[in-house]
Amino acid sequence: MYKSGFVTIIGRPNVGKSTLLNRVIGEKIAIISNKPQTTRNKIQCVYTEEEAQIVFIDTPGIHKPKNKLGEYMVSASKDTLKEVDVILWLVDESTKIGPGDEYILEEIKEINTTKILVINKIDKINQDEVKEIISNYENLNVFDHIIPISAQDGQGVNYLLKTIKEIIPEGPQYFPDDMITDQPERLIVSEIIREKALHYLEEEVPHGVAVGIELMRKRENKDIIDINAIIYCERSSHKGIIIGKGGKKLKGIGKSAREDIERLLGSKVYLEIWVKVEKNWRDKEKTIKYFGYV
């Protein structure tokens, strides 16, 4: 008996959705940052075993949008809720149910799909605090299962996978054994560069940053891939911050990104990055489409 199904991962920004996905898949597919709303795309990743295949859909965090990009991100998250076999709702180690959690609860409580509450970051709290969080959510009578995990160190992740495999229906293998994502390499490369920018930049810059890949080409008869990328920002003042004094910050972004891209592609990479200003791009539908967010 072969089982297969689709699982969406939802939650407030920065609760560890991408970290969990990367842990399960065993590869760095979704970018990670301590900045909220890091994930902008709906990403499908495929976990395949001998007797089961789980297709995980990592979504942008559900939040109240402030611009067209935000509207797209929330729409991408909500659209998956009724299309899947299991909803995984991630929360962090906070023992209180906040306004952001209540907003998501309103979205999912009337949906008949099987719901698993995943309490992430339990490595940061003690057992009594874990029990308190479980009790708070059990009283809501919304979830079919409540599973505490640490996506960072792997605690509870195998049990979570076992529970999902018990829930998903019999079905075909949708994707080949060696396929782990539906994301094109160019998009993953652009997201890796954006991740490094998020790590290097000041608080006021990251949400206004996007990355476009102008060129990605393997050299003839050489194991080298040339990549030309542009980091877009919304203000002229941000351009100077991204480049840094003497180009130091941009060099750091490029070096760190190149190392991850070489691991991803299994090849030497020659990476060139420029910075351009595209004012208010998050409210321009045409530009949002260019960056692959619709």
Image (cartoon, rainbow, N blue to C red):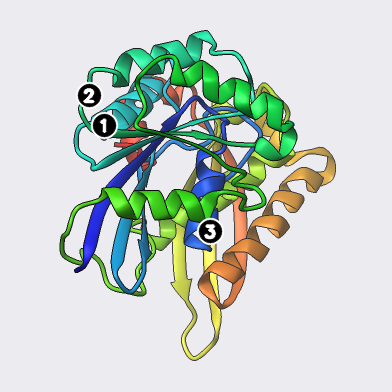
For the N terminus, give its image quadrant: bottom left
Q: Position of residue 248 (x, y in %)?
A: 81, 47
- Above or below residue 290? Residue 62 is above
Say left or right for 238 vs 186: right
Local crowd at mark 2 within 10 Å, few (<14), some, or many (≥20)?
few
Q: Which residue is mark 3?
A: 228
Q: Which residue is mark 2?
A: 111
Asked whether the residues under the numbered discs 2 and 1 touch, taking CB atoms below 8 Å apart as contact, a structural biologist would say yes
Asked whether the residues under the numbered discs 2 and 3 touch, taking CB atoms below 8 Å apart as contact, a structural biologist would say no
Residue at figure coordinates x 35%, y 49% from the top left: 164
- Above or below residue 215? Residue 82 is above
Label 3 secondary element: strand
Residue at figure coordinates x 23%, y 43% from the top left: 85
Q: Nearer the viewer, mark 2 or mark 1?
A: 2
For the C terminus, give its image quadrant: top left
First of labels 2, 1 by sequence position? 1
Q: Confirm whether residue 255 shows in the render.
A: yes
Instruction: Give the farthest residue toward the bottom.
Output: 221
Quarter of the figure with residue 172? bottom left
Q: Which residue is mark 1?
A: 81
Quarter of the figure with residue 50? bottom left
First of labels 2, 3 by sequence position? 2
What amino acid is at disc 2?
Answer: Ile
Local crowd at mark 1 within 10 Å, few (<14), some, or many (≥20)?
many
Q: Position of residue 173 (x, y in %)?
A: 21, 67
